[in-house]
Amino acid sequence: MKKLLVISMLILAGITACNRIKTGDSDRNRLKIAVVLKTRSATFWRTVEAGCDEAAAKYGVELIKLGPSTEDAVEQQINMVQDTMVQDIDALIFAPSQPAAAATVLQRAKIAGVPVILIDTPMPESFTDYVTFIGIENYTAGVQAAGEIMTQIPLGSKVVIIEGAPGNPVTTQRADGAEKAFRDNGYIITSRQPGYSDRERAFTMIQNILQSTPDVAAVFASNDEMAHGAYRAITQAGKRAVVVGVDGNQDAIESIIAGGLYGTLAQRTKRMGYLGVESAVKAIKGEAVEKHIDPGTDMITQINARNFIK
């Protein structure tokens, strides 16, 4: 009987050991996934993070969540990714502020055998060492948002386009799509400038533009943060213009309901974060993951805004 008991205990111990994740110096029972965002201070990224948290709770995952104070702190973000490489992580979820600058550090992840999940922002086409990219088609998003604006202003009206930080392909592609749509349909692009995904910078930019071009009819902002800044500048100048952003942040939806912003093209932001963690878990387990996952978009205006308020 004692011999059988000993054998049973040894088998149980073996099973327990196999169910653990073996790391360099110690065993642990939970997957550890690093999430490095463009920033953790903006509403958009806090919503992405909430989606990551929800999936982490479901799958029993430990998250290391990092992000610089602003989206243009590129070097700081790269350093954060480097720091995660020495923390024994099982996967990396990453939203690169400037993809070209991130190639070297992601090669380090490949060498370490760490699967990489890209969210919101893809790497250049020549870089393929990642599991999946989770994000919308940003050029198409810009075209779609511009199309909505054009339903509200006369043909030939003056339009301002605000993109994000230089080198950020997400906001640049959105601005490119919007500019192409406006120009092809006979609208005047009076200015296109970077707003660095920051309300105050967008506010100051629009203030300056209105001094020389007071008859701006509409503003397309590549994200909601900049749309808020643009709208405040227009309002303080005592003018009216159609302002549309991208992301679908809750404060943008509240502004739409209150008659402020005209609209926002909503990414399913929380879903993006959730899918990031879910895809990372699948990759760690060796399960198949699609190379591109589009979480989808919704055009939100006063017509449907109350359906999206939380």
Image: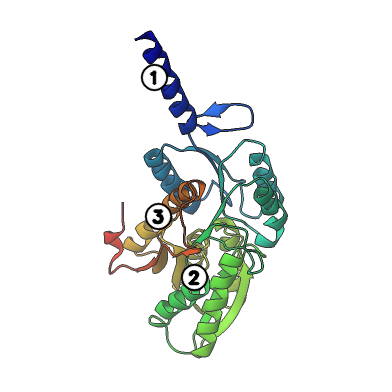
Distance of label 3 from label 1 (alpha carbons): 44 Å
Note whether 33 is above or below 6 in the view shown. below
Q: Residue 217: which disc?
A: none
Pointer 3 with pointer 1, Cβ within 8 A: no
Pointer 2 with pointer 1, Cβ within 8 A: no
Q: Residue 161, can we see it? A: no
Crowd around label 2: few <14 · some 14–19 · many ≥20 (10 Å): some
Residue at figure coordinates x 71%, y 50% from the top left: 75
Of the two numbered discs 2 and 1 on the same chain, state the one appearing first in sequence.
1
Residue at figure coordinates x 41%, y 52% from the top left: 270
Q: Which residue is mark 3?
A: 271
Of the two numbered discs 3 and 1 on the same chain, state the one appearing first in sequence.
1
Residue 26 at x, y = what percent? Answer: 59, 26
Task: Name the amino acid type tagged 2.
Answer: Glu
Q: Secondary structure at mark 3?
A: helix
Distance of label 2 from label 1 (alpha carbons): 55 Å
Q: Which residue is mark 1?
A: 8
Nearest the camera: 170 or 295? 295
Quadrant position of residue 190: bottom right
Q: Secondary structure at mark 2?
A: loop
Q: Residue 137: which disc?
A: 2
Pointer 2 with pointer 3, Cβ within 8 A: no
Residue 291 at x, y = what percent? Answer: 51, 63
Mark nearer the viewer, 3 or 1 = 1
Residue 120 at x, y = what percent? Answer: 52, 60
Crowd around label 3: few <14 · some 14–19 · many ≥20 (10 Å): many
Of the two numbered discs 2 and 3 on the same chain, state the one appearing first in sequence.
2
